[in-house]
Amino acid sequence: QVQVVESGGGLVQAGGSLRLSCAASGRFLSINAMGWFRQAPGKQRGLVVDITRGGITHYGDSVKDRFTISRDNAKNTVYLQMNSLKPEDTAVYYCNAKILTSGHYYDMDYWGNGTLVTVSS
């Protein structure tokens, strides 16, 4: 059983900062890419940023220079430092991990339940 659990959401004023964390646990062979997606009310879920096991990152255009992803492979954890937050960053943020488990030949997507980030103006 694999679990992916986010933490760190909350309410913040525009211009403020928040740090999200996501940890994967359970029985698996390896964790490859990990990343953050978000879904605002009435909108589709979209990529915020992801990071490979080797540290290569891919940022969405709207968060470049404001958000920073980092990863601790030893702890199976990924972090999202969000600075200069804007009201339009308000969304549920979901952690995604591409994980290889025994009996499979390819990574499967595992998702957390999401954490709400609300940015007030």
Image (cartoon, grey):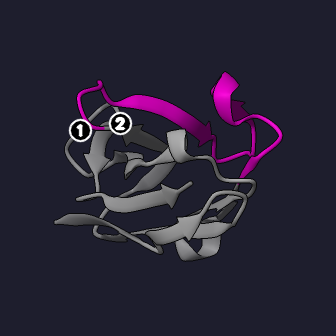
Name the outermost residue toward the right.
65
Q: Residue at x 41, y 41 (%)?
A: 38
Q: Which residue is mark 1?
A: 104
Q: Residue at x 43, y 59 (%)?
A: 118
Q: Residue at x 47, y 52 (%)?
A: 31
Q: Position of residue 69 (x, y in %)?
A: 69, 52
Q: Position of residue 113 (x, y in %)?
A: 23, 59
Q: Position of residue 34 (x, y in %)?
A: 51, 47
- Secondary structure of the residue carrying numbered label 1: loop
- Secondary structure of the residue carrying numbered label 2: loop
Whether 63 is among the magenta residues is yes
Q: Residue at x 61, y 68 (%)?
A: 18
The vertical placement of 19 against 54, above or below, is below
Q: Amino acid at mark 2?
A: Asp
Q: Nearer the viewer, residue 115 or 87?
A: 87
The vertical placement of 81 against 99, above or below, is below
Q: Quadrant of residue 79?
A: bottom right
Q: Quadrant of the C terminus?
A: bottom right
Query: Horizontally, is 93 left or right of 61 in the view?
Result: left
Cβ–Cβ under 8 Å for marks 1 and 2: yes
Crowdedness of circle 2 by 10 Å Cα count: few (<14), some, many (20+)? some
Crowdedness of circle 1 by 10 Å Cα count: few (<14), some, many (20+)? few
Question: Which tag is nearer the camera, tag 1 or tag 2?
Answer: 2
Q: Position of residue 59 (x, y in %)?
A: 68, 31
Whether 56 is among the magenta residues is yes
Q: Nearer the viewer, residue 115 or 29?
A: 115
Q: Amino acid at mark 1?
A: His
Q: Which residue is mark 2?
A: 107
Count of numbered badges drawn on the protein: 2
Can the viewer see residue 14? Answer: yes
Q: Which residues are magenta?
A: 41-68
Query: Horizontally, is 57 left or right of 120 in the view?
Result: right
